[in-house]
């Protein structure tokens, strides 16, 4: 189980914000933790999947998409801040996330 | 290795970017003119389009609208001198790809859409059929879910590594979508159509559609079209006619179609149409290429 530090949170936040800015073709300063993923940014589940793949590589995570999918369906996120928190939980718990 | 360009054409618009109308008018395209030409050709009412109106909510009109936006966007790219070496149309996007390759006129493309819709309308009107999209489950898992729960349902398109489209009876579709969610699909949603496009349920309409195809003046393609059915390059009229039939009644594979473009050294791809559905789908299609934003040309 990985330890989540302030540094980790900062890194994850930076990746998430950069990713949405590029994908949504908007300026970085137009996105905040309160931005609504669907309503404000036209985000979708493929973007969520891509982010998981990015963090899987970056943190060398042992995760199965199906497991994350089961967790995500039960714990849907709406804002960028909630998405960052979920990514941190995935990094912390990997495939054990369902046991939380 | 020379860098090549391809134009890809969507079949539907799940969400407008809301830049479409401004982009058309900035490029001196009168979109109402496209609507009027097709209104006259089909003898149906295609009123002025706005993002907030409900005039284009039905299946036929929404397909026509997607087609006309694609054709208008293509006309802009052509005016700007951007020339593709290949084109490909996602599902009903085939008609716009034929328009771009100068095989059919704007009106003929609309007539194809109208006729295909009319021919299968007996099925559509029962409202017992539909389609669904599953994101985040491996194809082998989806095949298993179908086999176990609703064997008449078919996988009719692979969008990318993580996105699969199914078609069949609505009750079966909903069952598979529900099971997919339980299995860990990131998303499983019913599509807003009542026609199981590309499935075996459309095979019985092959003859009628083939008869119609034989009555239409089609020219060889000036730009090769990549088949979404078997990814061959299509230029000749006879091949186009076969493809039109396959496109309605057989499974397609967008993932393989995009991969084929990449093997042909395509590195610049433009999504010719409203919304950005094909850009979204391209996320899990790996390769050395760029999906260019049409708004930045």
Image (cartoon, coloured by chain):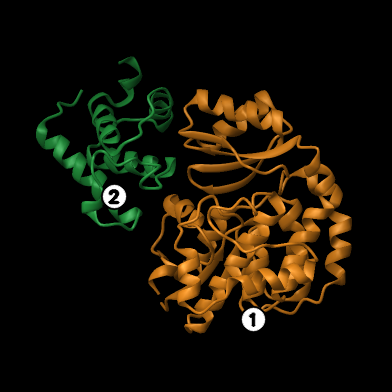
Chain colours: A green, B orange
Q: Residue B26 location, x and y as percent?
A: 45, 76
Image mark for residue B222? 1
Locate residue B147: give its quadrant: top right
How many neighbours does mark 2 have within 10 angstroms: few (below 14), some (14-19), or many (20 or more)? some
Residue for badge 2 = A19
Q: CA distance from mark 2 to mark 1?
A: 38 Å
Does residue B271 appear left or right of residue B197 in this picture?
left
Q: Under tag 2, what secondary structure?
A: helix
- Classify the position of the C terminus of chain A by image quarter: top left
Q: Under tag 1, what secondary structure?
A: loop
Is the residue at mark 2 from the same chain as the one at mark 1? no
Does residue A97 appear left or right of residue B293 in this picture?
left
Q: Is residue B67 shown above or below A63?
A: below
Residue B3 or B115: which is nearer the viewer?
B115
Q: Is residue B90 shown above or below B201?
A: below
Give the number of the mark in front: 2 or 1.
2
Residue B77 or A63: which is nearer the viewer?
B77
């Amino acid at each position: 189980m990985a330890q989540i530090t302030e540094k980790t949170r900062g890194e994850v936040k930076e990746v998430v914000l950069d990713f949405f800015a590029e994908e949504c073709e908007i300026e970085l300063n137009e996105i905040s933790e309160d931005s609504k993923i669907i309503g404000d940014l036209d985000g979708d589940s493929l973007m969520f999947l891509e982010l998981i793949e990015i963090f899987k590589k970056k943190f060398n995570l042992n995760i199965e998409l199906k497991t994350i999918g089961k967790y995500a369906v039960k714990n849907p996120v709406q804002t960028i801040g909630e998405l960052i928190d979920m990514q941190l939980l995935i990094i912390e718990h990997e495939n054990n996330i369902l046991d939380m | 290795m020379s860098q090549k360009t391809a134009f890809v054409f969507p079949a539907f618009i799940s969400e407008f970017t809301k830049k479409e109308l401004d982009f058309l008018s900035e490029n001196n395209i009168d979109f109402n003119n496209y609507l009027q030409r097709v209104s006259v050709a089909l003898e149906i009412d295609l009123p002025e389009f706005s993002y907030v109106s409900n005039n284009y909510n039905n299946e036929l009109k929404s397909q026509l609208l997607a087609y006309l936006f694609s054709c208008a966007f293509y006309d802009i790219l052509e005016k700007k001198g951007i020339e593709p070496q290949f084109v490909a149309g996602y599902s009903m996007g085939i008609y716009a790809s034929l328009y771009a390759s100068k095989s059919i006129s704007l009106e003929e493309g609309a007539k194809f859409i109208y006729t295909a819709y009319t021919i299968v309308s007996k099925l559509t009107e029962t409202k017992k059929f539909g389609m669904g999209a599953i994101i985040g489950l491996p194809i082998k898992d989806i095949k298993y879910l179908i086999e176990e729960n609703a064997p008449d349902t078919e996988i009719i398109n692979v969008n990318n590594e993580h996105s699969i489209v199914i078609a069949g009876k609505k009750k079966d579709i909903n069952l598979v979508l529900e099971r997919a969610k339980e299995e860990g699909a990131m998303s499983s949603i019913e599509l807003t159509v009542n026609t199981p496009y590309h499935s075996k349920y459309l095979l019985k309409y092959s003859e009628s559609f083939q008869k119609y195809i034989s009555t239409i003046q089609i020219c060889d393609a000036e730009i090769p079209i990549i088949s979404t059915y078997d990814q061959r390059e299509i230029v000749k009229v006879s091949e186009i006619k076969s493809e039109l039939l396959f496109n309605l009644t057989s499974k397609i594979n967008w993932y393989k179609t995009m991969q084929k473009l990449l093997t042909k050294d395509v590195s610049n791809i433009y999504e010719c149409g409203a919304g950005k559905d094909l850009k979204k789908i391209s996320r899990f299609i790996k390769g050395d290429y760029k999906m260019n934003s049409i708004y930045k040309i």
